[in-house]
């Protein structure tokens, strides 16, 4: 056993004693495997999790030890997947069974690279997260119960909100009509009173109003105050980012571990596909890859291969036969001169020699053709074939490793938009049905979408009057029932340039889509939000925290533009000032230049 441990440490290469102490003191289990899956190093924590002594595991094949319990098949599959994962970010949670105990392990892996870039093994980092998994399952059950109870309340709230919105609109109309009627009544009464007064009052009562002791008429002192112009829009809550989850290969669904509309965590298993078909294809690719490697090896050593050696032996044999025929023909020529043999026998030997010469020529051609089979071009073609087969094998291996479809991000599991649209239109095609156990799906099909709630998007519509003032970058205050009475800050991120025509009523109205993004969403708010909730957006079109606003009647309109009579600092004689006017508000008109705080504006 000591020899195995020494061999394992030689595989890892020399390491400082300090580094070994650091690994040994880690709270996570650390195991290194060589390319054959043998344990080359293991710390005490990893041995405790596995339930064996470190010395007993050194040099042993980890998968063989784990498969002593058949329930550890998923764990061994994960270790095999990690050995083929070249991204260096392999992460998976699997169950580990040891006797009557069941644990949930958090497995991370990274390939060991040699100086030449070759793979020398894999490093496994193991953590026991059994308690965390139990707590997460409890939280999921509680979330399901809360979601069921919340559905009824949500429907009731939406009905109340629609009724409240209709009532608010009616009240605003009534209030506007009342204000108009009141203003008209006041105007009529005031006009009548003024007429009566001017017609009956003595002349001294109709003199101008008294002046201040300084000799100037009474006026308004410019005082800065905050102003804000907003546009109110009602919208619908959407996830800030939507991630599609697609099928890695074609096959039937073995298990479905999520519910549309529920929350999922990153790394959570969503679906499990039957990989029997892709496994059969992968085994064929393994055989094809082995044959292709053998062919490359034969071509690289073609000069010393069996076919070339056989062709050379055939050529050597043909040359020997030709030499023998030449010797026999030469001897027969001498005997023919002496009259010992007949000419017919001599001519027969000549014919045999010509046949042997043809045989030598044919053997030389066969040898040249055989040698050409191992040329550089043929080796390149064989290597390219091998590379194509290995790429196909790697792709099939990755697809098979994806049989357990995990959530790439945390968020809400949503039906694919194409499927939701087909369902809304009454479609019954494959795109309009939910995924269920036994359903056969095609490679690349969108199984579900995950709405990432780390950021939120609220989508609404503004009318053609306000759209010219709404632009990306404007601040927005978002409120809604899902925020628990807490206003959130957002920003306009998109304003559509194409109108949506509403044809309800007599006069069609053009409305434009506007999208508001809310970042840094508090966790407490995120837990209560649901996709599709309504929200009210107050888009801040204009804001000035120190604005000077004056009544319109203080402005004198001239052909050269607006004019004001101002006593600077409230002292001295009034002077005429050319103001720069800003926005018009119900409170008055903003003056952006020409006035300072403390100036007194005299009525014209």
Image: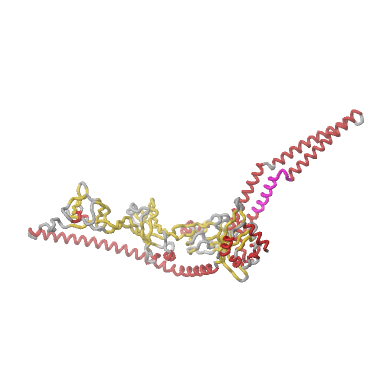
Furthest-bottom residue in view? Answer: 100
Furthest-front residue in view? Answer: 17
Q: Which secondary structure class fits the magenta region best?
A: helix
Q: Is residue 384 visible?
A: yes
In this rendering, position of residue 24 left or right of residue 294? left
Pick the quarter of the image with the N terminus. bottom right
Q: Nearer the viewer, residue 186 or 105?
A: 105
Q: Nearer the viewer, residue 19 or 480?
A: 19
Residue shown at the point (14%, 58%) measured from the top left: 212
The image's colour scheme reads: secondary structure
Q: Is residue 284 magenta?
A: no
In this rendering, position of residue 350 left or right of residue 391? right
Q: Which residues are magenta?
A: 285-305
Q: Is residue 437 visible?
A: no
Q: Give how far across and how far down residue 218 sits, in percent.
A: 16, 58
Q: Is residue 293 magenta?
A: yes
Residue 257 position (above or below residue 363): below
Furthest-top residue in view? Answer: 337
Q: Give how far across and how far down residue 30 sits, in percent.
A: 58, 62
Q: Give how far across and how far down residue 119 sits, in percent.
A: 61, 54
Q: Nearer the viewer, residue 196 or 279?
A: 279
Q: Give how far across and how far down residue 496 sits, in percent.
A: 39, 52
In terms of image quadrants, where is residue 530? bottom left
């Amino acid at each position: 056993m000591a020899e195995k441990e020494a061999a394992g440490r030689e595989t890892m290469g020399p390491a400082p004693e300090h580094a070994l102490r650091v690994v040994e003191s880690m709270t996570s289990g650390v195991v290194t495997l060589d390319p054959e899956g043998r344990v080359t190093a293991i710390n005490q924590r990893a041995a405790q999790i596995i339930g064996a002594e470190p010395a007993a595991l050194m040099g042993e094949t980890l998968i063989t030890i784990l498969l002593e319990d058949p329930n550890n098949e998923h764990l061994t599959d994960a270790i095999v997947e990690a050995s083929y994962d070249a991204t260096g970010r392999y992460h998976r949670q699997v169950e580990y069974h040891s006797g009557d105990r069941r644990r949930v392990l958090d497995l991370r892996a990274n390939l060991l690279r040699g100086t030449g870039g070759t793979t020398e093994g894999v490093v496994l980092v193991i953590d026991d997260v059994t308690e965390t998994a139990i707590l997460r399952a409890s939280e999921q059950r509680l979330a399901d119960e809360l979601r069921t109870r919340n559905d009824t309340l949500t429907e009731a709230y939406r009905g109340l909100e629609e009724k409240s919105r209709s009532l608010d609109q009616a009240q605003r109309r009534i209030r506007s009509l009342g204000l108009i009627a009141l203003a008209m009544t006041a105007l009529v009464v005031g006009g009548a009173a003024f007429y009566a007064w001017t017609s009956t009052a003595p002349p001294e009562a109709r003199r101008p109003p008294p002046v201040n002791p300084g000799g100037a008429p009474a006026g308004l002192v410019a005082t800065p105050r905050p102003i804000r112009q907003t546009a109110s829009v009602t919208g619908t809550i959407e996830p800030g980012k939507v991630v599609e989850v697609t099928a890695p290969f074609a096959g039937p669904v073995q298990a479905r571990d999520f519910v549309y509309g529920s929350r999922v965590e990153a790394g959570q298993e969503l679906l499990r596909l039957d990989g029997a078909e892709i496994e059969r294809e992968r085994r064929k690719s393994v055989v094809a890859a082995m044959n292709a490697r053998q062919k490359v090896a034969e071509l690289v050593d073609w000069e010393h291969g069996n076919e070339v050696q056989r062709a050379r032996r055939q050529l050597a044999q043909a040359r020997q036969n030709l030499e023998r025929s030449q010797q026999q023909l030469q001897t027969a020529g001498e005997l023919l001169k002496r009259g010992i043999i007949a000419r017919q026998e001599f001519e027969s030997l000549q014919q045999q020699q010509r046949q042997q010469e043809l045989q030598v020529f044919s053997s030389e051609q066969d040898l040249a053709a055989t040698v050409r089979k191992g040329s550089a071009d043929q080796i390149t073609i064989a290597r390219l074939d091998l590379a194509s087969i290995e790429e196909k094998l790697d792709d099939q291996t990755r697809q098979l490793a994806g049989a357990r479809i995990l959530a790439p991000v945390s968020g809400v599991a949503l039906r694919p938009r194409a499927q939701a649209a087909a369902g809304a239109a009454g479609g019954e095609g494959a795109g309009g049905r939910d995924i269920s156990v036994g359903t056969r799906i095609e490679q690349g099909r969108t199984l579900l979408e995950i709405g990432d709630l780390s950021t939120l998007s609220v989508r609404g519509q503004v009318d053609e009057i306000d759209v010219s003032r709404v632009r990306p970058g404007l601040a927005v205050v978002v409120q809604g029932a899902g925020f628990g009475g807490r206003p959130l800050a957002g920003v306009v991120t998109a304003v559509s340039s194409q109108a949506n025509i509403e044809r309800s009523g007599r006069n069609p109205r053009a409305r434009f889509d506007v999208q508001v993004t809310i970042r840094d969403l508090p966790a407490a708010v995120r837990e209560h939000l649901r996709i599709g909730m309504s929200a009210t957006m107050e888009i801040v079109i204009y804001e000035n925290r120190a604005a000077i606003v004056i009544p319109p009647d203080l402005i004198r309109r001239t052909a050269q533009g607006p004019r004001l009579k101002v006593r600077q600092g409230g002292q001295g004689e009034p002077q005429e000032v050319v103001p720069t006017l800003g926005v018009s508000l119900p409170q008055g008109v903003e003056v952006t230049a020409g006035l300072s705080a403390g100036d007194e504006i005299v009525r014209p």
